[in-house]
Image (cartoon, rainbow, N blue to C red):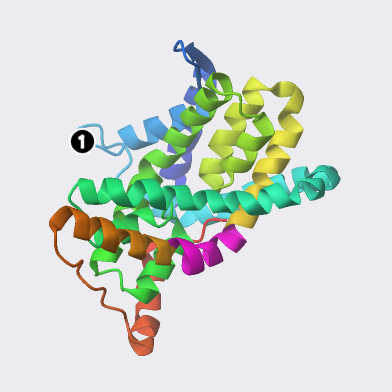
């Protein structure tokens, strides 16, 4: 505890400053951007690690990383207490909650062509087969290895998502809620992408915009996130990844007028050896 004293002081300071700034709503014509204290805390947290500010040094960054799992467990426990009282409503909406995972195919259909257009090759398969959270990094790592082109792609999106994903999802939720006819419950379900931090940012924004629906919004978001963590893995393995490879071969041939480079799959022994490497790079986020 004493060794992490500086880290705790930094965190408390960021929380107090962010809460004092409060919630801000910005009307942008086509919708409303909701900036929550959580987003301010994330931005400030990034800023204090860069030079010349450099308040949080490498030691604090490493310590913070080791505590993420604990804090997310507490967060998910809290969301579990929210799901319980609304379990009847959630059960009635179960088909929608399960089928919403097919939205992941949209990531493939849009992401792979854009990635190839930007100049990526087999990296586009790792980058665009999912939103590249921890389970997806593990899938690519065990099938191709993280030192492969596919590994470069998934790790690139993973790192960008870790730094900017929560901010982006939180802001996008406010815009979609106010600029489109989508129901808040539908957006809450869409918030459950398999990342607790992203889901929390999106659900908090929706709850601020629709306080009378706040409890159900949080329940739908939490249930959706849990299901995404479960069936999202199978969706990636059996549908999204094969579709990404198929789409990659067709678009690559169309663009470069030649056959796409073939993948190099790991053997069973190589995949087993790579498991430790994957575990070191990622932390499981429910």
Which quarter shows the C terminus?
Answer: bottom right
Magenta region, main secondary structure: helix
User: For residue 193: magenta?
Assistant: no
The magenta-colored residue range is 229-240
Kindly give the residue lying farthest to the left in the view shown: 257
Q: Label 1: state its secondary structure.
A: loop
Q: Is residue 210 left or right of residue 157?
A: right
Give the answer, above or below, for where 127 lies relative to 182: below
Q: Estimate the x, y position of residue 88 in percent, counting from the top left.
A: 85, 46
Q: Estimate the x, y position of residue 123 in percent, counting from the top left.
A: 25, 59
Front in this rendered view, residue 103 or 69? 103
Residue 212: quadrant of the picture: top right
User: For residue 234: magenta?
Assistant: yes
Q: Estimate the x, y position of residue 63 in percent, counting from the top left.
A: 41, 53
Kindly give the residue lying farthest to the bottom in the view shown: 269
Residue at numbered disc 1:
51
Front in this rendered view, residue 20 or 241? 241
Front in this rendered view, residue 107 or 82? 107
Front in this rendered view, residue 75 or 172? 172
Give the answer, above or below, for where 166 lies relative to 19: below
What residue lies at 48% left-to-right and 68% top-to-bottom?
Answer: 237
Residue 195 makes an appearance in the image: no
What residue lies at 69% left-to-right and 38% top-to-bottom?
Answer: 218
Q: Estimate the x, y position of residue 165 in percent, counting from the top left.
A: 42, 41
What residue lies at 81% left-to-right and 47% top-to-bottom?
Answer: 92
Give the answer, above or below, for where 42 lies relative to 246: above
Give the answer, above or below, for where 270 lies relative to 166: below
Structural crowding at the residue carrying mark 1, measured as other residues with C-alpha within 10 Å and reported as few (<14), some (14–19) or many (≥20) = few
């Amino acid at each position: 505890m004493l060794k992490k004293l500086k880290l705790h002081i930094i965190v408390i300071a960021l929380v107090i400053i962010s809460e004092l700034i409060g919630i801000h709503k910005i009307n942008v014509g086509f919708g409303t951007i909701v900036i929550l204290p959580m987003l301010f805390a994330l931005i400030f947290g990034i800023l204090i690690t860069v030079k010349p500010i450099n308040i949080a040094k490498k030691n604090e960054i490493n310590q913070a990383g080791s505590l993420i799992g604990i804090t997310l467990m507490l967060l998910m426990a809290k969301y579990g207490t929210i799901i319980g009282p609304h379990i009847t409503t959630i059960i009635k909406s179960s088909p929608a909650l399960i089928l919403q995972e097919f939205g992941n195919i949209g990531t493939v259909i849009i992401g792979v062509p854009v990635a190839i257009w930007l100049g990526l090759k087999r990296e586009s398969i790792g980058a665009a087969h999912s939103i590249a959270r921890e389970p997806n990094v593990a899938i690519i790592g065990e099938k191709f290895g993280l030192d492969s082109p596919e590994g470069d792609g998934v790790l690139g999106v993973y790192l960008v998502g870790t730094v900017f994903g929560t901010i982006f999802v939180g802001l996008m939720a406010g815009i979609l809620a106010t600029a489109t006819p989508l129901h808040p419950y539908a957006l809450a379900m869409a918030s459950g992408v398999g990342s607790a931090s992203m889901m929390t940012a999106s659900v908090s924004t929706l709850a601020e915009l629709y306080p009378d629906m706040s409890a159900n919004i949080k329940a739908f978001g939490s249930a959706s996130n849990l299901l995404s963590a479960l069936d999202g893995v199978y969706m990636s393995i059996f549908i999204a990844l094969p579709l990404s490879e198929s789409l990659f071969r067709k678009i690559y041939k169309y663009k470069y007028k030649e056959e796409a480079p073939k993948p190099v799959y790991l053997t069973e022994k190589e995949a087993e050896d790579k498991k430790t490497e994957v575990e070191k790079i990622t932390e499981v986020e429910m």
